[in-house]
Image: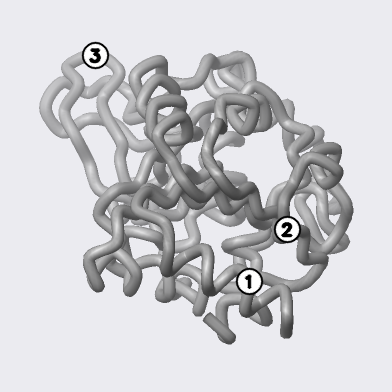
Amino acid sequence: MEKIEQLRQWVNQSRHIVFFGGAGVSTESGIPDFRGVDGLYRQKFEYMPEEIISRSFFWRRPEYFYNFYRQKMLPLDHDPNVTHNVLARWEQEGKDVTVVTQNIDGLHQKAGSQKVLELHGSVLRNYCVSCRASYPAEFLRDAAGVPTCTKCGSIVKPDVVLYEESLNTKTLEQSVAAIENADLLIVAGTSLTVYPAAGLIRYFRGRHLVLINLDETPYDSQADLVLHDKLGNVFSKL
């Protein structure tokens, strides 16, 4: 409890808080990650998951891509958990909280957070590759086969960063600026091994770095506070 009390004190004292979250934030809402015990990388498919959700595979085998995407990557029936809700509550209470997330499920916004930077995009945004018309996630979910634009007939693509694609430059720049300006950086539910996202922690110059993750990370020795625990256990006490 001493660590929880320390974290609570730092949250209360900080003017600018950045929460940098990975897959471990969403797993407690029932959304599987890629590398965990029940993750996609441990399941058996005709192709490796990282190949299926690559840019080249998307264009080569769009029907197979969408069959996989609908089954494994459209978490539309999941709800925010205590971590999402506590972060949203801090913001509603007047704290300056920016969420930088590697997740694509939109659960932070569903919980009520307004300042959310999505490094890998979002399943909730989809667009026509030709005319750029926008479509909701339900359009992709309910489409038969490959979803096509109702205006021009071109394929509709999720606004998520696939393998072989770069992160959005503007989102990266905004994330760096938020981290540089933060008094408190809470890094949670991520192994900090996937780059370039993991490299963002290097821009932090604030007072306190907190790492919350079940397993050790390469940055544990640099943190002011480390909690090897489930996020729900930590945030339910905050």
Looking at the picture, does residue 95 appear above or below residue 223?
A: below
Q: Percent from the top left, x then y, of residue 183?
A: 46, 45
> Of helix, strand and loop, which one carries label 2?
strand
Residue 196, quarter of picture? top right
Of residues 53 and 90, the one drawn nearer to the viewer in this rendering: 90
Name the residue tied to disc 3: 130
Secondary structure type for disc 1: helix
Tell me if label 1 and label 2 are in contact, CB under 8 Å.
Answer: yes
* Distance between the alpha carbons at the discs numbered 3 and 1: 52 Å
Q: Position of residue 13 (x, y in %)?
A: 43, 63
The x, y position of residue 216, in whole percent, is 88, 52
Q: Residues within 10 Å of mark 2 (few under 14, many from 20)?
A: some
In terms of sequence position, does the residue under pointer 3 or pointer 1 come before the other? 1
Image color mode? one colour
Amino acid at pointer 3? Ser
Residue placed under numbered mark 1 in the picture: 6
For marks 3 and 2, give the one nearer the viewer: 2
- The three-letter code of the residue at mark 1 reads Gln
| Residue 173, label in figure | none
Judging by the rendered image, the residue that carries numbered circle 2 is: 225
Viewer can see residue 159? yes
Q: In terms of depth relative to the viewer, which is nearer, 180 or 118?
A: 180
Q: CA distance from mark 3 to mark 2?
A: 48 Å
